[in-house]
Image: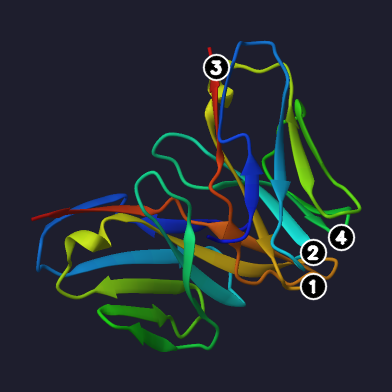
Amino acid sequence: DSGVTQTPKHLITATGQRVTLRCSPRSGDLSVYWYQQSLDQGLQFLIQYYNGEERAKGNILERFSAQQFPDLHSELNLSSLELGDSALYFCASSEISGGSTGELFFGEGSRLTVL
Amino acid sequence: GQQVMQIPQYQHVQEGEDFTTYCNSSTTLSNIQWYKQRPGGHPVFLIQLVKSGEVKKQKRLTFQFGEAKKNSSLHITATQTTDVGTYFCAGKAYSGAGSYQLTFGKGTKLSVIP
Protein backbone atom coordinates (compact mmCIF):
# COMPACT_ATOMS: atom_id res chain seq x y z
CA ASP A 1 0.00 0.00 0.00
CA SER A 2 1.61 3.23 -1.22
CA GLY A 3 -0.62 5.46 0.89
CA VAL A 4 -1.99 7.21 -2.21
CA THR A 5 -5.74 6.75 -2.66
CA GLN A 6 -7.52 7.09 -5.96
CA THR A 7 -11.24 6.93 -6.65
CA PRO A 8 -13.04 5.58 -8.51
CA LYS A 9 -11.08 2.44 -9.42
CA HIS A 10 -13.19 1.85 -12.51
CA LEU A 11 -15.38 4.18 -14.52
CA ILE A 12 -17.39 3.51 -17.66
CA THR A 13 -18.98 6.42 -19.47
CA ALA A 14 -20.05 7.58 -22.90
CA THR A 15 -18.43 9.88 -25.40
CA GLY A 16 -19.09 13.54 -24.78
CA GLN A 17 -19.47 13.07 -21.04
CA ARG A 18 -17.42 14.57 -18.21
CA VAL A 19 -15.81 12.72 -15.31
CA THR A 20 -13.81 13.63 -12.25
CA LEU A 21 -11.04 11.49 -10.83
CA ARG A 22 -9.96 12.03 -7.28
CA CYS A 23 -6.63 11.51 -5.55
CA SER A 24 -5.55 11.74 -1.93
CA PRO A 25 -1.77 11.88 -1.57
CA ARG A 26 0.28 10.25 1.16
CA SER A 27 0.10 12.03 4.45
CA GLY A 28 2.54 14.94 4.39
CA ASP A 29 3.24 14.87 0.65
CA LEU A 30 2.75 18.27 -0.93
CA SER A 31 3.29 17.33 -4.59
CA VAL A 32 0.71 15.51 -6.66
CA TYR A 33 1.26 14.27 -10.20
CA TRP A 34 -1.19 12.91 -12.76
CA TYR A 35 -0.19 10.40 -15.42
CA GLN A 36 -2.08 8.73 -18.24
CA GLN A 37 -1.27 5.17 -19.28
CA SER A 38 -2.91 3.81 -22.41
CA LEU A 39 -2.77 0.15 -23.42
CA ASP A 40 0.85 -0.96 -23.78
CA GLN A 41 1.97 2.63 -23.49
CA GLY A 42 4.28 4.30 -21.09
CA LEU A 43 3.39 6.85 -18.48
CA GLN A 44 2.41 10.15 -20.06
CA PHE A 45 2.87 13.03 -17.65
CA LEU A 46 -0.18 15.29 -17.53
CA ILE A 47 0.27 17.80 -14.73
CA GLN A 48 1.87 18.43 -11.35
CA TYR A 49 0.66 20.44 -8.39
CA TYR A 50 2.63 21.51 -5.38
CA ASN A 51 0.85 22.77 -2.29
CA GLY A 52 -2.17 23.92 -4.26
CA GLU A 53 -0.36 25.53 -7.15
CA GLU A 54 0.27 24.21 -10.63
CA ARG A 55 3.98 23.43 -10.91
CA ALA A 56 4.46 21.72 -14.24
CA LYS A 57 2.39 20.83 -17.25
CA GLY A 58 2.91 17.95 -19.62
CA ASN A 59 0.88 16.67 -22.53
CA ILE A 60 -2.46 17.55 -21.02
CA LEU A 61 -5.32 18.22 -23.41
CA GLU A 62 -7.34 21.43 -23.15
CA ARG A 63 -10.39 19.28 -22.39
CA PHE A 64 -8.64 18.13 -19.22
CA SER A 65 -8.09 20.21 -16.13
CA ALA A 66 -6.93 19.59 -12.60
CA GLN A 67 -6.65 21.28 -9.26
CA GLN A 68 -5.24 20.67 -5.82
CA PHE A 69 -7.31 21.70 -2.84
CA PRO A 70 -6.19 23.15 0.53
CA ASP A 71 -6.37 19.69 2.11
CA LEU A 72 -3.93 18.60 -0.65
CA HIS A 73 -6.24 16.18 -2.38
CA SER A 74 -6.41 16.61 -6.13
CA GLU A 75 -9.00 16.15 -8.83
CA LEU A 76 -8.53 15.56 -12.53
CA ASN A 77 -11.47 16.63 -14.66
CA LEU A 78 -11.91 15.10 -18.10
CA SER A 79 -14.57 16.62 -20.33
CA SER A 80 -16.01 16.06 -23.81
CA LEU A 81 -14.69 12.54 -23.56
CA GLU A 82 -13.55 10.69 -26.65
CA LEU A 83 -12.92 7.00 -27.23
CA GLY A 84 -9.19 7.69 -27.20
CA ASP A 85 -9.37 8.96 -23.63
CA SER A 86 -9.90 5.41 -22.42
CA ALA A 87 -6.87 4.72 -20.27
CA LEU A 88 -5.54 4.13 -16.80
CA TYR A 89 -5.03 7.39 -14.95
CA PHE A 90 -2.48 7.35 -12.15
CA CYS A 91 -1.97 9.83 -9.42
CA ALA A 92 1.36 9.95 -7.64
CA SER A 93 2.66 11.96 -4.74
CA SER A 94 6.09 12.97 -3.59
CA GLU A 95 7.45 14.06 -0.25
CA ILE A 96 10.07 16.34 -1.72
CA SER A 97 9.28 19.99 -1.31
CA GLY A 98 10.03 22.79 -3.67
CA GLY A 99 10.90 22.12 -7.28
CA SER A 100 12.76 18.88 -6.81
CA THR A 101 11.19 15.62 -7.94
CA GLY A 102 11.86 12.79 -5.54
CA GLU A 103 10.63 9.23 -5.42
CA LEU A 104 7.03 8.99 -6.60
CA PHE A 105 4.41 6.94 -4.77
CA PHE A 106 1.68 5.85 -7.13
CA GLY A 107 -1.94 5.11 -6.41
CA GLU A 108 -3.63 2.06 -7.84
CA GLY A 109 -5.08 4.08 -10.69
CA SER A 110 -8.50 4.85 -12.10
CA ARG A 111 -9.42 2.87 -15.19
CA LEU A 112 -11.58 4.94 -17.50
CA THR A 113 -13.51 3.31 -20.32
CA VAL A 114 -15.26 5.56 -22.81
CA LEU A 115 -17.89 3.82 -24.94
CA GLY B 1 11.82 18.97 -24.50
CA GLN B 2 13.51 16.18 -22.66
CA GLN B 3 13.09 12.71 -24.13
CA VAL B 4 13.84 9.37 -22.53
CA MET B 5 14.16 6.38 -24.80
CA GLN B 6 14.02 2.86 -23.42
CA ILE B 7 14.81 -0.38 -25.22
CA PRO B 8 13.76 -3.03 -25.84
CA GLN B 9 10.02 -2.51 -25.68
CA TYR B 10 9.41 -6.22 -25.03
CA GLN B 11 11.64 -9.04 -23.88
CA HIS B 12 10.77 -12.70 -23.52
CA VAL B 13 13.27 -14.81 -21.63
CA GLN B 14 13.47 -18.36 -20.36
CA GLU B 15 13.49 -18.59 -16.59
CA GLY B 16 17.09 -18.50 -15.43
CA GLU B 17 18.31 -16.33 -18.31
CA ASP B 18 19.57 -12.81 -17.79
CA PHE B 19 17.70 -9.67 -18.82
CA THR B 20 18.82 -6.09 -19.51
CA THR B 21 16.90 -2.94 -20.31
CA TYR B 22 18.55 0.28 -21.46
CA CYS B 23 17.56 3.87 -21.02
CA ASN B 24 18.89 6.92 -22.90
CA SER B 25 18.12 10.55 -22.28
CA SER B 26 18.38 13.42 -24.75
CA THR B 27 19.66 15.66 -21.95
CA THR B 28 21.99 15.31 -19.00
CA LEU B 29 20.11 14.08 -15.97
CA SER B 30 20.26 15.08 -12.31
CA ASN B 31 19.33 11.53 -11.41
CA ILE B 32 17.53 8.54 -12.76
CA GLN B 33 14.88 6.43 -11.10
CA TRP B 34 13.65 2.93 -11.89
CA TYR B 35 10.15 1.62 -11.33
CA LYS B 36 8.50 -1.77 -11.73
CA GLN B 37 4.87 -2.27 -12.65
CA ARG B 38 3.48 -5.75 -12.20
CA PRO B 39 0.64 -6.82 -14.53
CA GLY B 40 -2.52 -5.11 -13.38
CA GLY B 41 -0.62 -3.09 -10.80
CA HIS B 42 0.82 0.35 -10.35
CA PRO B 43 4.43 1.50 -10.72
CA VAL B 44 6.55 0.91 -7.66
CA PHE B 45 9.84 2.68 -7.03
CA LEU B 46 12.92 0.46 -7.16
CA ILE B 47 15.91 2.72 -6.90
CA GLN B 48 17.44 6.12 -7.63
CA LEU B 49 20.92 6.73 -9.06
CA VAL B 50 22.52 10.13 -8.64
CA LYS B 51 26.26 9.99 -9.24
CA SER B 52 28.06 9.66 -12.56
CA GLY B 53 29.08 6.03 -13.11
CA GLU B 54 27.12 4.84 -10.08
CA VAL B 55 26.34 1.16 -9.76
CA LYS B 56 23.84 -0.20 -7.26
CA LYS B 57 22.72 -3.74 -6.59
CA GLN B 58 19.55 -5.16 -5.14
CA LYS B 59 19.91 -8.93 -4.92
CA ARG B 60 19.77 -10.10 -8.57
CA LEU B 61 19.17 -6.57 -9.94
CA THR B 62 22.08 -4.33 -10.96
CA PHE B 63 21.50 -0.69 -11.85
CA GLN B 64 24.04 1.50 -13.62
CA PHE B 65 24.17 5.23 -14.35
CA GLY B 66 26.40 6.29 -17.22
CA GLU B 67 29.46 8.49 -16.85
CA ALA B 68 27.79 11.28 -18.82
CA LYS B 69 24.59 10.92 -16.78
CA LYS B 70 22.57 10.44 -19.95
CA ASN B 71 22.06 6.71 -19.91
CA SER B 72 21.28 3.92 -17.52
CA SER B 73 20.68 0.21 -17.48
CA LEU B 74 18.96 -2.40 -15.35
CA HIS B 75 20.29 -5.94 -15.45
CA ILE B 76 18.55 -8.89 -13.86
CA THR B 77 20.57 -12.06 -13.33
CA ALA B 78 18.88 -15.46 -13.55
CA THR B 79 15.34 -14.22 -14.04
CA GLN B 80 12.49 -15.71 -12.07
CA THR B 81 8.76 -15.68 -12.75
CA THR B 82 8.40 -13.09 -10.01
CA ASP B 83 10.39 -10.67 -12.18
CA VAL B 84 7.54 -10.44 -14.70
CA GLY B 85 6.32 -6.91 -15.27
CA THR B 86 7.18 -3.66 -17.00
CA TYR B 87 10.31 -1.82 -15.95
CA PHE B 88 10.37 1.94 -16.39
CA CYS B 89 13.25 4.33 -16.14
CA ALA B 90 12.51 7.94 -15.27
CA GLY B 91 15.02 10.70 -15.78
CA LYS B 92 15.00 13.82 -13.66
CA ALA B 93 16.24 17.00 -15.30
CA TYR B 94 16.10 20.69 -14.52
CA SER B 95 13.25 22.31 -16.45
CA GLY B 96 13.78 25.93 -15.44
CA ALA B 97 12.26 28.33 -12.90
CA GLY B 98 13.49 26.24 -10.02
CA SER B 99 11.60 23.15 -11.15
CA TYR B 100 12.63 19.66 -12.12
CA GLN B 101 10.76 17.33 -14.42
CA LEU B 102 10.67 13.56 -14.24
CA THR B 103 10.28 11.99 -17.69
CA PHE B 104 9.44 8.33 -17.98
CA GLY B 105 10.63 6.00 -20.69
CA LYS B 106 8.00 3.83 -22.41
CA GLY B 107 9.11 0.83 -20.39
CA THR B 108 10.33 -2.68 -21.13
CA LYS B 109 7.78 -5.41 -20.68
CA LEU B 110 9.47 -8.56 -19.39
CA SER B 111 7.90 -11.98 -19.82
CA VAL B 112 9.52 -15.00 -18.18
CA ILE B 113 8.82 -18.44 -19.57
CA PRO B 114 8.92 -21.08 -16.81
Closer to the camera in the image, B32 or A6: A6
- Up the image or down, A46 lies above or below B5; here it is above
**Percent coordinates x, y for residue A47 in the rendering:** 73, 47
Q: CA distance from mark 1 to mark 4?
A: 9 Å
The structure residue drawn at horizontal position 79% and vertical position 69%, both measured from the top left corner, is A99
Seen from the viewer's position, the closer of residues A59 and A6 is A6
Task: Give the mark nearest the N terminus, 1 or 3.
Answer: 3
Mark 3 and mark 2: span between their CA atoms?
Answer: 33 Å
Residue located beneath label 3 in the image: A83
Q: Amino acid at mark 1?
A: Ser
Pointers 1 and 4 in contact (C-beta within 8 Å): no
Question: Which residue is tagged 1?
Answer: A97
Mark 3: amino acid: Leu
Chain under callout 1 = A
Q: Nearer the viewer, residue B94 or A36?
A: A36
Q: Amino acid at mark 4?
A: Asn
Kind of residue at badge 2: Leu
Q: Nearer the viewer, residue B44 or A10?
A: A10
User: Which secondary structure, mark 1?
Assistant: loop
Distance between mark 2 and mark 4 Cα atoms: 5 Å
Q: Residue at x 17, y 67 (%)?
A: B79
Helix, strand or loop status at disc 3: helix
How busy is the neighbourhood of tag 1: few (under 14 within 10 Å), some, or many (20 plus)?
A: few
